[in-house]
Image (cartoon, rainbow, N blue to C red):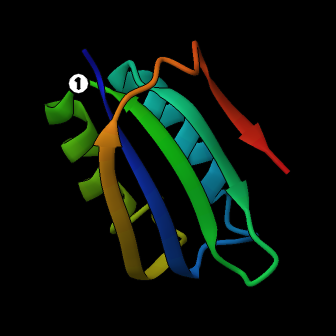
């Protein structure tokens, strides 16, 4: 069974490569899911995988890549639904 993590990241997280760096980190950890920019300036992401790896991803999201400035990460845990096979960048 897998777990799932849904995050909304606030701060200077658009226009700084946050989505691309998130994809690289998620793939490094062996997670699947997606990441996308929102119209309000936040980044939203869904990750599925083993809980310890998701916890590591959550810690990473709190800082992001070096050129980002994260001010808040809202997150919710749930049971994974195996609705992904890779990690993709959306819109």
Task: Say which residue label 1 marks.
Answer: 50
Left/right of residue 40 with respect to residue 23 in the rendered view: right
Q: Dot 1, how many residues are within 10 Å of its Cα: few (below 14), some (14-19), or many (20+)? A: some
Residue extending farthest to the left is: 52
Q: Position of residue 82 (x, y in %)?
A: 48, 17
Q: Is residue 81 above or below residue 62?
A: above
Quadrant, the N terminus: top left
Left/right of residue 45 with respect to residue 49 in the rendered view: right
Q: Position of residue 17 (x, y in %)?
A: 67, 57
Q: Residue at x 43, y 61 (%)?
A: 64
Q: Is residue 83 above or below residue 42?
A: above
- Indicate the secondary structure of the residue bearing disc 1: loop
Q: Is residue 70 above or below residue 33?
A: below
Q: Is residue 19 above or below residue 2?
A: below
* Number of callouts: 1
Residue 40 lies in quadrant: bottom right
Q: Nearer the viewer, residue 78 or 8?
A: 78
Q: Position of residue 84 (x, y in %)?
A: 58, 20
Left/right of residue 70 with respect to residue 45 in the rendered view: left
Q: Residue at x 45, y 24 (%)?
A: 81
Residue 4 lies in quadrant: top left
Q: Residue at x 51, y 44 (%)?
A: 46
Q: Residue at x 18, y 33 (%)?
A: 51
Q: Position of residue 45 (x, y in %)?
A: 55, 51
């Amino acid at each position: 069974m897998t777990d799932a993590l849904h995050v909304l990241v606030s701060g200077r997280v658009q226009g700084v490569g946050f989505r691309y760096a998130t994809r690289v980190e998620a793939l490094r950890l062996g997670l699947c899911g997606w990441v996308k920019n929102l119209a309000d300036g936040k980044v939203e992401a869904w990750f599925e995988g083993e809980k310890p790896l998701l916890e590591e991803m959550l810690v990473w999201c709190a800082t992001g890549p070096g050129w980002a400035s994260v001010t808040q990460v809202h997150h919710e845990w749930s049971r994974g639904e195996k609705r992904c096979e890779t990690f993709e960048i959306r819109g």
